[in-house]
Image (spheres, coloured by chain):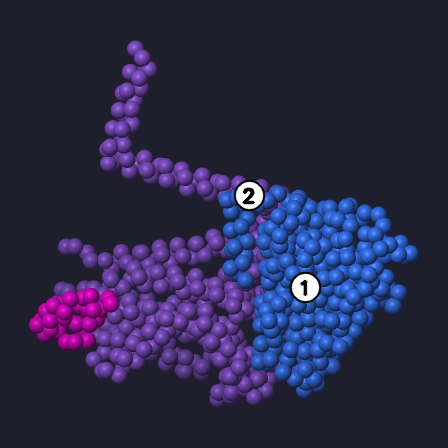
Chain colours: A blue, B purple
Amino acid sequence: MRVTQFAALGAALSLTAMTAQAGTLEDVQARGELNCVVTVGVAGFAAPDENGKWTGFDVDFCRAVAAAVLGDGEKVKFVPTTGKTRFTVLNSGEGDILFRNTTETMSRDADLKLTFLPVNYYDGQGFLIRKELGITSAKDLGGASICIQTGTTTELNLADYFRVNGIDYEPVAIETNEEGITNYSANRCDVYTTDASGLASTRAALDDPSAHMILPEIISKEPLGGAVRNGDDQWADIGLWVVNASIIAEELGVTSANVAEHAAAAGNNPSINRLLGTEGDMGAMIGLDKEWAVRAISAGGNYAESFDRNIGPDTPIGLSRGLNALWTNGGILYAAPIR
Amino acid sequence: MSETALSQPQRNIVSRLWNDKETRSVIIQIIAFAAIFALFFYMIRNAVINLEAIGKDIDFAFLTQPASYDIGQTLIEYTSRSSHFTAMIVGIINTLLIAVFGIFLSTILGFTLGVLRLSKNWLTNKLAYVYIEYTRNVPVLLHILLIHGLIVHALPLPKNALNVGDAAFLTNRGFFLPSPQFEFLFWLVLGLFIIGIIFSLWFRSYAKKIQDSTGKYYPVFWISLGAIVGIPLIAYFILGSPIQWQIPELKGFNYKGGMVVRPEFIALWIALSCYTAAFIGEIVRAGITAVSWGQTEASSAFGINRSRTLSLVVIPQALRIIIPPLTSQYLNITKNSSLAIAIGYMDIVATIGGISLNQTGREMECMTIVLLLYLSFSLLISAFMNWYNKRIKLTER
Ligand SMILES: N[C@@H](CCC(=O)N[C@@H](CS)C(=O)NCC(=O)O)C(=O)O
């Protein structure tokens, strides 16, 4: 919110110049804690559970990075942000890395000075609506009141889509997903729009999920991924390879259950050996030790484990892999090799 | 001659300057000023260095780029293709709208409360007291959220709208009201109204002159009322009511046509007004009680009746006490309007200081604009109130 923006401005103005851009790894290790920028709360992606412990698909990536860098997936301080504050928080140095349902775009990359990590969820923007309204297509939404989270690609896509289709609507600006649920539940808006994954999570949180549906139209591409500040290539590499390691582990069948066994001694699959450091010293290239990926995978499992546990078909969110299946299984998840 | 001999008179000068009360205060002021300046310089330098480190510059050119987002309440022409600058103007207008409506309502409510607090009737007095204590002691943000929540949860959906005389429709999406369409003859009525105001202003000073020189008394209030309201009203009906009302109609999801006041505006307006009114009530009460009772007694000794005593003796003196703290309440309402963000009312902070800032990543630029805007609003209000304060000041004769 506003307070955070002023705080960030204050931080930028503050007396001690921010620590130099390079050396995020050293800073994090000296601090003994990773500051990970996440959402205020989107069930399945990043939200505190009933015991106050942060869980979710994005949270698992924070923990994997902390495990690789600090040796312990619990040494994470989660910094909750709204769509509007997330980049300021990251750029002002309050956060080290961001995993927050964030769409990779050109302006964010070039103008907001972010470095994106590989996409960890291929998404698109959808519309959530009450079944009783009898609407079957987004084209019939003329005149509707639509809740949108400000500071997102969502509000830009929405403005474009309605303009292109020549229909009008009333935008109802909200700050967080929770506010979105409140306003949608109270019928302040007919429609709630955000990334389809977020809608699935929102729908699961409604009183009677079966009374609501997601319209067939997906109006945008939302490649969601992590991000770091520009200017520290080593730190960006760490983020990049931790995400890749999680996907590669799924490709190779390395899970949190069997990773210790695989890592005990070099096997006859060189790919697994390189990933787990039993052959060569890939970790040293990004400033880490040989077992960096072993720890990352132990912390939250490989990509599939984290997906299934947090947002998969057996969870209330109930997302299928779809585009996010491995490229060998008909999806487009395709990680650069570790070699 | 040794060095000590040379520095002796110098030390004397320093200590002499220091011991002099006047120069000492000047020295301290210079040092303090230099320190503050250095601090600011240091902070700005730091910001520039830090921005440079992540490769950002300071550039206001983004203001001419398309904003690309839609805004719910726009009083001027605005689409998602308009510039960030236009979005900022929309925000400024929305903020000013809240400030002006808020100042208006809180003043009326506040003066009423202040007078009620002085009422001899136990019940009215205590009711006003309870209202003031409750309102003052709950943070204004909660009032805003509460009223917004009430409107959004308690009012019906458009299809079951509360129908007020087939003209206005109250829903949880806002109040849909008929909007006036002015015909040509209406401007004649408006002209009469303006002439009425000018006439009343002239007549007031004329009547005072006559009264001063001859003692003849004109009922200025009634004559002015007739000129400002009566004559235009008669003309309005003679000309056949030259205003057409466009009635909102339910079409699809929402009402179309007419005009709409959104829940966000209502919540912010009512909450800020009620909250500030409680403070104004106390200021008014204090102002009136501060005028010594002797004044009232003296006035009645002259045979001046009670209501004229109030309007001619007590209130003019009370106003002098009321105006300065009242000014700061007006400033508060303007600044507190930035709490709009909590319910998504698109004011300055939400537009240029929120979405534009976020979509362009121009924190420094946007925040500077927002700070300067609030600063200039506050200075304008202060300047006006200071002018008014001077005007009503006790003039020594
Ligand atoms: N992907 C879009 C939208 C991201 C977004 O804000 N999504 C919502 C709903 S999935 C969210 O994360 N809300 C989190 C919160 O309110 O804490 C973007 O990057 O701009």
Q: Residues within 10 Å of mark 1 (few under 14, many from 20)?
A: many
Residue at 55% over, 53% down: A8
Q: Please indicate, yes or no, whether residue B247 appears anywhere in the rendered image.
A: no
What is the distance, in whole Å, between disc 1 and disc 2 at their CAs?
30 Å
**Depth order, front residue of B219/A154:** A154
The amino acid beneath tag 1 is Val
Q: Position of residue A236 (x, y in %)?
A: 72, 50
Q: Please indicate, yes or no, whether residue B397 appears anywhere in the rendered image.
A: yes
Question: Which of the chains bears the disc numbered 2?
Answer: A
Q: Would you name the residue on which mark 2 appears?
A: A17
Q: Quadrant of the N terminus of chain B?
A: top left
Q: Position of residue B25 (x, y in %)?
A: 28, 38
Check if residue B306 falls in the magenta segment: yes
Check if residue B49 falls in the magenta segment: no
Task: Give the secondary structure at mark 2.
Answer: loop
Of mark 1 and mark 2, the one earlier in the sequence is 2
Q: Position of residue A240 (x, y in %)?
A: 75, 54
Q: Both on one chain, marks 1 and 2?
A: yes
Question: Which of the chains bears the disc numbered 1?
Answer: A
Residue at 77% over, 68% down: A305
**Depth order, front residue of A124/A7:** A7
- Segment colored magenta: B286-314
